[in-house]
Amino acid sequence: MAATETVRAGVQPVAEADFPTRWGHFRIYAFEADLGAGLESALALRLGELETPLLRIHSQCLTGDVFGSQRCDCRAQLELSLAAIAASGNGLLIYEDKEGRGIGLINKIRAYQLQDRGDDTVEANQRLGLPADARDYRLPVEMLRWFGVRRVKLMTNNPAKIEALAAAGIEVVERVACQPPALSTHADRYLQTKRNKLGHLLTPKR
């Protein structure tokens, strides 16, 4: 069934491999697809059987995930998600190439420069003539279909991800919060903007 759906959707898993990590022993899949906006790529880390799996759709953040930036919560969310999936024994983490909420790495650093001058993350993108959030979730949806997943427990704070899956016929049976307990104060304004301007489901810091 998965192969048939791959042909229909145009999604191509180009490679897969064994993938032990410090959180758990995953299997990693590399996907490529052209869904109308040029070639896109994403990875999937799979653990166990995928019957109503715990799912995290994580957008690439080089500055946070690799360099440990304290301006955002991305690395902390990634690590929290991998730990939660490992603990559940059944889950999927989709890591998509959508740096800076889809505006790309160089524009993201340009936005950082504007934030240093006083703009928040939304205002900086707008000043650059870019959307506050340029992502869509078509590739993750098609990857879920390839895996045969129809129902998920979605680990997110972003209502747009819930809406995108629901619109594509993927049932979100539960939203699991993805809010790390301790973050640097450098991320305070960023999180406040995500909550107040982007509608993210975040509990204010006390």
Image: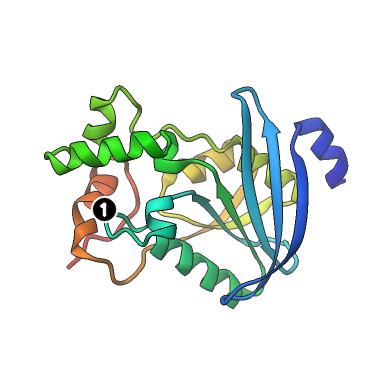
Where residue 88 appears, as percent x and y from the top left, is 61, 74
Above or below, 21 against 11 in this view is below
Instruction: In the rendered view, tell whether residue 45 sits above or below residue 146.
Output: below
Count of marks placed on residues: 1
Horizontal side, residue 86 vs residue 4: left or right: left
Q: Residue at x 37, y 63 (%)?
A: 179
Query: On the rendered image, what quadrant is the C terminus found in?
Result: bottom left
Query: Is residue 89 placed above or below 31 in the rendered structure?
Result: below
Colouring scheme, one of rainbow, by chain, secondary structure, one colour? rainbow
| Quarter holding residue 198 | top left
Residue at the left extreme, as displayed? 118
Instruction: Please give the name of the residue rendered at 58% of the width and 69% of the height, measured from the top-left corner.
Output: 85
Q: Splitting the image into 4 quarters, where does residue 6 fall?
A: top right
User: Can residue 178 be seen from the camera position used here?
Assistant: no
- 186 sits left or right of 15 in the view: left
- The residue under the point 87% across, 46% down is 1
> Going by the image, does 139 lie left or right of 134?
right
Q: Which residue is mark 1?
A: 191
x, y percentage for residue 8?
81, 31
**Which residue lies at the image location 16% right of the left edge and 43% below the top edge?**
116
Instruction: Tell me if residue 198 can be seen.
Output: yes
The local crowd at label 1, few if under 14, some if 14 to 19, many if 20 or more residues have their Cα within 10 Å, is: many
**Left or right position of 119 against 108:** left
Q: Horizontal and vertical percent for residue 115?
A: 19, 41
Q: Secondary structure at mark 1?
A: helix
In this orientation, which residue lies closer to the viewer: 182 or 98? Answer: 98
Q: Provide residue 164's location: percent of width, then percent of height.
A: 54, 38
Q: Amino acid at mark 1?
A: Leu
